[in-house]
Amino acid sequence: MELKVLLVDDEPAALERLSALFAQIPDTKLVGVARNGREAGHAIAELAPDLVMLDIQMPELSGLALASELAPETRPEIVFVTAFEVYAADAFAVEAADYLLKPVRFDRLRQAVERARRRRTLQRAYEQQVEATAQVRENDLDGIWVATRQGHIRVAVSEIDWIEAAKDYVLLHTATRSHIHRITMSALEQALDPARMIRVHRSAFVSPDRVEAINRLGKGLIALVLRDGVSVPVGPTYVKAVQGRLGLVVEEV
């Protein structure tokens, strides 16, 4: 499925960098750029993009305000791109597919694009899957209740690809979106079943079922490559435990 992409940022250098990165991502087509929120709103109505890479701090209308104005039934997938972490909670509250910090890493951009693509593809089938998903969650005691503006939603651990620390919060990354949750990494480690979610770094947990490759970084360090292509480094003190958990046979040097 080819995604039509609109880039929105008031900084020309940021637009140039995103354009260059998207040139390396297959099945995407840049259909336009906008330099402020009002211009972006008109471009979305005219071009009907599938995905909007949206800066937050812009003149005339912020990215968050624009996202809030869009009708949910016709709104494109949105990935916020910003230099500031403080907007993460608000970004996920408006159902953003992802939240990227500048300068944007290529692996995180690719992950965000694939997540948006998956959300787009699954949108029509979602309602049919709700009943089956609910049955799975009833039998899955390892869920995390995440606060939203409307109340709370329960994220099953079986749906989580990986978890990363974000100051006083954590980001729960699933195949279709990320959830922001206020909890410490140490509290999570006590609550999570280590057979289903392993700690690989002081700032990250990973589902072993989502690991598709292991890259050597030198000096005994490794990184785990997940199914979306994102690379999660393993902390030096976690390397042996992670290798053992994944059943990796390590030759003694």
Image: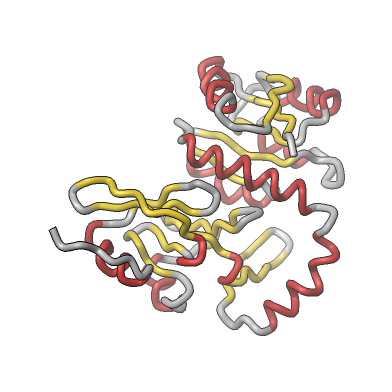
| Quadrant assignment for the N terminus | top right
Q: Going 56% across and 34% down the picture, which residue do you hit?
A: 81
Count of numbered circles in the view:
0
Visual colour scheme:
secondary structure
Quarter that holds the C terminus: bottom left
Q: Quadrant of residue 131?
A: bottom right
The residue at the point 63 percent across, 44 percent down is 114
Residue furthest to the left in view is: 253
Which is nearer the eye, 229 or 84? 229
**x and y, in percent, of residue 172 in the image:** 54, 59
Q: Residue at x 46, y 78 (%)?
A: 193
Q: Nearer the viewer, residue 117 or 181?
A: 117
Relative depth, front residue between 162 and 210: 210
Q: In the drawing, does residue 59 fall left or right of residue 197?
A: right
Q: Is residue 213 above or below residue 43?
A: below
Q: Position of residue 59 (x, y in %)?
A: 64, 22
Q: Position of residue 110 (x, y in %)?
A: 55, 39
Residue closer to the observer: 79 or 87: 79
Residue 98 point in image, percent of width and height: 60, 45
Of all residues, the one furthest to the top in this rendering is 12
Residue at horizontal 62 percent and vertical 56 percent from the top? 175
Relative placement, left or right, of 138 versus 189 is right
Give the vertical position of 43 relative to 64 (above or below): above
Q: Does 202 sit above or below residue 132?
A: above
